[in-house]
Amino acid sequence: QLTASAKELAKVPLAPTFGTIEQTVEGLIAIFGQFNKSLTDTGYILDLVNEFAAKFAVESQDIFDAVRRGGAAFSAAGGSLEEFVSLFSVLRQVTRESAESLGVFFKTGIAELFSPKSQAELKRLGVTATDVLGQLNELATIFNSSQLTANEKITTGASLVGQRQFNRLLSLLKGIQDPNIQKQIQAAQKGVIGSIDRDAVSRLDDFGISLNRVRESFQ
């Protein structure tokens, strides 16, 4: 397992979305611990992070930082790594806020969303899903319809996730129902498997072209 994991990590310098090997290892350790992943998942995790970083206005390090701050709470609420990366990428793109700030949203906002008080409020609104993504999607449909007034959206959002986080909740609910962002998510999901290998081949091809140019300049 360790050898296979090291082999996957060796590709990181050829993927433009990642930082240093050390930063990537630290990010992987955070994901292993907070989403119950193992060394055998290394390749898939790197592909997932790389593809979403390529498709969205987000860096791989942003995703790792957000996981460190909010991954545990999101996982405890039943959310998967794939859902976390997708939702964080959307929120980062639409708000342009720092990974640290958005990580706090996933830590405190999601925890508050699953409190008994907020769950009762969701049922009152007509949300029937019990999982994180399902509840957010149903809530997005409600918030993006004419069911609530602008003031009701603000007061309801604050009631669900707290005064400090409701703006981020509203941004997320708007983002996940944006048709263009939905297409980005679908494209990223389809491109996860083999993402780093494709980037590595592309980078090596670029190196080859550059070397040929250097060689030709001496002829």
Image (tube, rainbow, N blue to C red):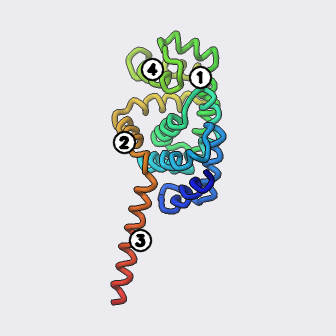
Amino acid at the residue labelled 2 = Ala
- Report the side of 70 relative to 49 (left or right): right
Residue that carries the numbered disc 3 in the rendered image: 207
Q: Nearer the observer, disc 1 or disc 2?
A: 2
Q: Which residue is drawn at 41% across and 71% down?
A: 207
Q: Residue at x 49, y 20 (%)?
A: 153
Amino acid at the residue labelled 3 = Phe
Q: In whole angstroms, how far apart are the C-alphas of marks 2 and 4?
A: 22 Å
Q: Where is residue 203 in the image (x, y as percent from the top left)?
A: 42, 64
Graded by Cα atoms within 10 Å as few (under 14), some (14 to 19) or many (20 or more), the crowding at tag 1 reads many
Which secondary structure lies at badge 2?
helix
N-terminal of the pair, mark 3 or mark 4, is 4
Graded by Cα atoms within 10 Å as few (under 14), some (14 to 19) or many (20 or more), the crowding at tag 4 reads some
N-terminal of the pair, mark 3 or mark 1, is 1
Residue that carries the numbered disc 1 in the rendered image: 113
Residue that carries the numbered disc 4 in the rendered image: 138
